[in-house]
Image (spheres, rainbow, N blue to C red):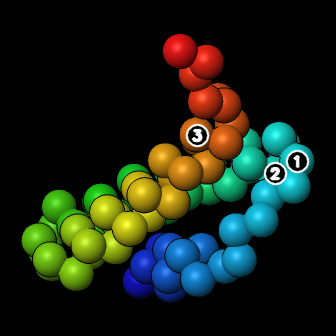
Amino acid sequence: MEIIDKALEFETRKLSFQTTSDRIVASREVKALILGVNEIYKENKDPELMDLMKRLTVIKKKIEVRLKGRSQS
């Protein structure tokens, strides 16, 4: 369950990505973690894994908003 440990560590990490490249790396890392947890979830349908994926997705969305910027509409 190494992927779950990595996901929990990422979730508790301080999220202050100073540069764009830091944000890109973090976005890719969290995406890989979500997909890895999803593979485990498919096997055993543990609701705690689903909650973990949801929390990681929220973090990923925040990173992507900072990457793309807010629209000027």
Instruction: Say which residue appears at 62% left-offset and 55% top-offset.
Output: 29
- As drawn, the label of residue 69 is none
Where disc 1 sits, the SS reads: loop
Q: Is residue 71 left or right of residue 69?
A: left
Residue 14 position in % (x across, y down): 71, 77
Where disc 3 sits, the SS reads: helix
Q: In front of the other: label 3 or label 2? A: 3
The residue where tag 2 is placed is 22
Q: Is residue 57 left or right of residue 2?
A: left
The reply to whether discs 2 and 1 touch (Cβ–Cβ < 8 Å) is: yes
Instruction: Say which residue appears at 68% left-offset and 55% top-offset.
Output: 26
- Say whether disc 1 or disc 3 marks the residue closer to the N-terminus: 1
Instruction: Say which residue appears at 23% left-offset and 68% top-offset.
Output: 50
| Mark 1 burial class by Cα count in 10 Å: few <14, some 14-19, many 20+ | few
Residue 68 position in % (x across, y down): 64, 29
Q: Marks 1/3: CA distance? A: 14 Å
| Mark 2 burial class by Cα count in 10 Å: few <14, some 14-19, many 20+ | few
Where disc 2 sits, the SS reads: helix
The residue where tag 1 is placed is 19
Residue 41 position in % (x across, y down): 22, 67
Q: Marks 2/1: CA distance? A: 5 Å
Q: Is residue 47 above or below residue 27?
A: below
Residue 55 visible in the displayed image: yes
